[in-house]
Image: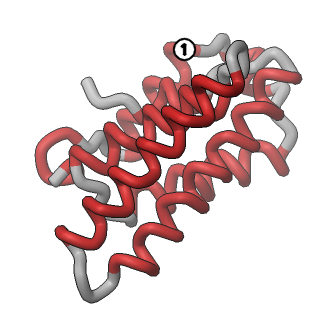
Amino acid sequence: NYNDRYFLSYEKYLQRLFSYTQNDILLSLTSQLLDQLMHILKIFFNSNITNIEFFLLNILLIFQSDRLNDITLDSMEEICMKILYTYEINTFPVKQSCRYNQLLDLSKQIRLLTQILLTHEHFYLPFLLIPN
């Protein structure tokens, strides 16, 4: 399980946040952006994401953020989503539908907040979710 072996504490994530950004940039975050960031990190912490889920979510975020070749990326994104769905069915048969949708929602929230942060020249959010 990702949480058991690699998960960083809130304190470590905040330290990482400060190391990837300058304090004045972090201070320039609006309270709404900071609230969104903390909300997403909280969801991420509480999701008990497995290593495979973490890996697949990272791939999805990359495919969804880089639109240089839409056709190729769309097909790769579809494949990755099918793999994630199949993994959820086989690993969490009782709650797979809910969990799959939860992971897709988390991915969407990360992507949207990342776009906002990059637009305001802050930082790339998925960077903070990578373990040591």
Viewer-proximal residue among 75 and 129: 75
Decide: is 72 above or below 64: above
Q: Position of residue 52 (x, y in %)?
A: 24, 46
Dividing the picture into quadrants, the one containing residue 56 is: top left
Q: Residue at x 59, y 23 (%)?
A: 72
Q: Along the horizontal axis of the image, is 46 left or right of 22?
A: left
Q: Nearer the viewer, residue 67 or 41?
A: 67
Residue matched to label 1: 20
Q: 111 or 16, which is in the foreground?
A: 111
Q: Position of residue 71 (x, y in %)?
A: 67, 27
| Rendered-image quadrant of the C terminus | top left
Residue 19 in percent (x, y) is at: 50, 14
- At x 64% / y 34%, what residue is drawn? 64
Quadrant of residue 130 in the image? Answer: top left
Q: In screen coordinates, is 26 left or right of 52?
A: right
Rendered view: 27 above or below 32: above
Q: How many marks?
A: 1
> Label 1 is placed on what type of residue?
Tyr
